[in-house]
Amino acid sequence: MYNVSRTYIKPGMKLFGLIEENPSLLLMMQHFDIDFRVDDLTVAQLCAEKGISEKLFVSVANLYNGFKPKDNPIDSLDDVKRVIAFLRNSHDYYRHDKYPQISSYIRQLQENHPEKELKLLEEFFNEYFTEVIEHLDYEDTVAFPYFIELIGNRENIKNDLYSAKEYSEHHTDIELKLKDIKNLLLKYVTIDSDLNLRRKLLFSLYELEYDLYIHSLIEETILIPFGYNMERV
């Protein structure tokens, strides 16, 4: 699902057409705290209007379209803050939107079909999301504050023992275990009817998996390389 052929986004392109091609860009804009009403604006015009780095916006948007950045788009403290705010907003989306939604769908299925394997499915997803929450909490309380301090006066960094390398080693692809949940639903769990509910559940799992994948890419291709570069200064 990550190799769909899409447009390589450039500053002069109109937002409306890009969103029509890939509606996932709406979620990206939500993470950036940008309103969806784009009028007839180009990417460059929107960035100027919202006071966001054109280079950063284009790099993240292209990740959603399947293209990794050639150069690190972080050029300032404001860029670092924007990236971290974006990632924190995505954390809120996982905690308060997708997790409750998916849990609700699983519970509804369990109530409609009280088979043992659906109870196991619920337990497996809850265990998985407990791991996700631990990962998000670690980023919010340890990793992100470090990167904010890193671009300032290095003499003021409180924890000299922490580094981008340690974050990279701690970093995991938290979206991968979702494949096991999808496999259970698509290959092994037998349920008659409830196609509408099952489709909603699977779509939500795919949406969560996709955004977690982009979340990881932003960290691996933008935030962590920025940390390595700053630590060498």
Image (cartoon, rainbow, N blue to C red):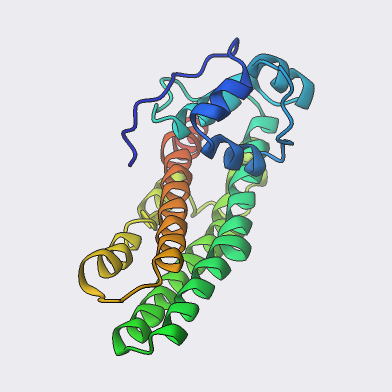
- For the N terminus, the image quarter is top left
| Residue plotted at (34% across, 32% down) | 4
Q: Position of residue 108 (x, y in %)?
A: 49, 79
- Quarter where residue 49 is shown: top right
| Residue plotted at (64% across, 18% down) | 43
Q: Nearer the viewer, residue 86 or 118?
A: 118
Q: Position of residue 150 (x, y in %)?
A: 60, 40
- Quarter where residue 47 is shown: top right
Q: Determine whether 62 is above or below 30 in the image.
A: above
Q: Nearer the viewer, residue 150 or 52?
A: 52
Residue 103 can be seen in this image: yes
Q: Residue furthest top?
A: 12
Q: Position of residue 72 (x, y in %)?
A: 48, 25
Q: Is residue 85 left or right of residue 212?
A: right
Q: Determine whether 221 is above or below 55 in the image.
A: below
| Residue plotted at (59% across, 13% down) | 11
Q: Residue furthest left?
A: 187
- Quarter where residue 154 is shown: top right
Total marks drawn?
0
Residue 145 can be seen in this image: no
Q: Residue furthest front?
A: 193
| Residue plotted at (60% across, 61% down) | 97
Q: Is residue 5 left or right of residue 26?
A: left
Q: Is residue 159 left or right of residue 2?
A: right
Q: Position of residue 114 (x, y in %)?
A: 38, 89
